[in-house]
Image (tube, rainbow, N blue to C red):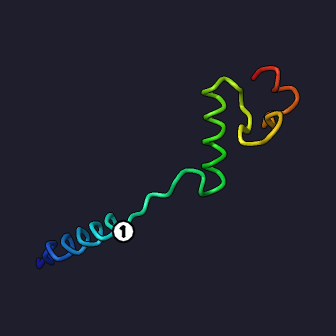
Amino acid sequence: MHREPRAPYLLLGGAALAVGLLLLIPLPPGLWHDDGVYLQFGRALARGEGLAYVGVPGDPACRAGVLARGTL
């Protein structure tokens, strides 16, 4: 039974991985909508402000419903 050598495929995969890592540009948080919302929620929870949008001017807009506001 004849087996193909694996070395060319491993070298090609390693080269593709290296090029991908060199071209990787980390994106700042908040660039996409949902990660910015999670970042704001985490910041509000860490500050003890509850589950609220901290980037909204005025009173923070609560994300929870009327009944859940008392538990937050």
From the viewer's perspective, tell me whether residue 40 is left or right of residue 14.
right
From the viewer's perspective, tell me whether residue 7 is left or right of residue 17.
left
Q: What residue is rendered at 30% in x and 71% in y? A: 19
Give the residue pinned by disc 1: 23
From the viewer's perspective, tell me whether residue 22 is left or right of residue 38.
left
Spot occupied by residue 72 in the image (x, y as percentages of width and height): 75, 23
Judge whether 41 appears above or below 33 on screen: above
Q: What residue is rendered at 66% in x and 54% in y? A: 33
Spot occupied by residue 39 in the image (x, y as percentages of width and height): 60, 42
Between 10 and 24, the one nearer to me in the picture: 24
In the rendered picture of this protein, how many numbered marks are placed on residues? 1
Q: What residue is rendered at 81% in x and 26% in y? A: 68
Q: Residue furthest top?
A: 71
Q: Quadrant of residue 23?
A: bottom left
Spot occupied by residue 32 in the image (x, y as percentages of width and height): 61, 57
Q: What secondary structure is marked by label 1?
A: helix
